[in-house]
Amino acid sequence: MSKTKKPTKPQKTQKPQKPPRLDINGQPLHWLVRPVTIKLLWLGGIALLALVTWLGTTVHPHATFGFEATLGFYSWYGFATCVVMVVFAKLLGVLLNKKDTYYDQ
C-alpha cells in the first residue's frame, strides 16, 4: 500500500498587528485623542443632536416669540451662541495680546 500525501491546506496567516500609536513621550495615546474615539464622539454628538431635535417635535413649545417655536430652534441657537463666544474670545485675545518682550523690560 502506498501512502499518498493529502494535499495540505494553505495555513491562514495572521495579519500583523499595528503597533499602538504613541505620543511624543513614547506613551500610548490617551483614549480621548485616538482617531477611532474622536470619530465615535463626533457620531455620538451628531446622533444626540438629531435625537434632541426630533424630541422637540413631540413637545408643544410654549414660546414667547414666534421664532422659538420653529423646529430645532434651541439646537441652532446653542450652536450660534457657541460660535459667537469663540469669535469673541479670539477678538479679546487679539486685543489683550502683549509682545513677547513685555516682561523683559
Image: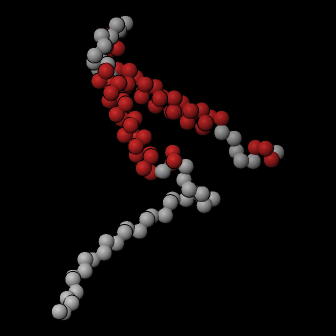
In this picture, residue 6 sits left or right of residue 49 = left
Residue drawn at x 36%, y 29% as measured from the top left: 49
- Image quadrant for the N terminus? bottom left
* Farthest-out residue, right: 105
Which residue is the extreme one toward the front? 1
Where is residue 102 drawn, in percent x and y? Answer: 76, 43
Residue 98 vertical placement versus 7 (above, below): above
Residue furthest left as drawn: 1
Q: Nearer the viewer, residue 14 or 27?
A: 14
Identify the residue at horizontal 25%, vertical 77% (top origin): 9
Residue 15 drawn above or below residue 7 = above
Q: In which quadrant will I find the C terminus? A: top right
Q: Residue at the location (35% across, 9% down)?
A: 63
- The residue lying toward the viewer, choosing from 53 and 98, is 53
Residue appearing at x 31%, y 75% in the figure = 11
Of 29 and 85, which appears nearest the observer?
Answer: 29
Q: How many marks?
A: 0
Vertical position of residue 31 compared to residue 92: above or below: below
The colour scheme of the drawn protein is: secondary structure
Kindly indicate the quadrant of the structure image that contains residue 74: top left
Horizontally, residue 53 falls left or right of residue 78, namely: left
- Rendered image quadrant of residue 92: top right
Residue 90 in the image, given as x and y percentages of width and height: 55, 36
Q: Position of residue 10 (x, y in %)?
A: 27, 77
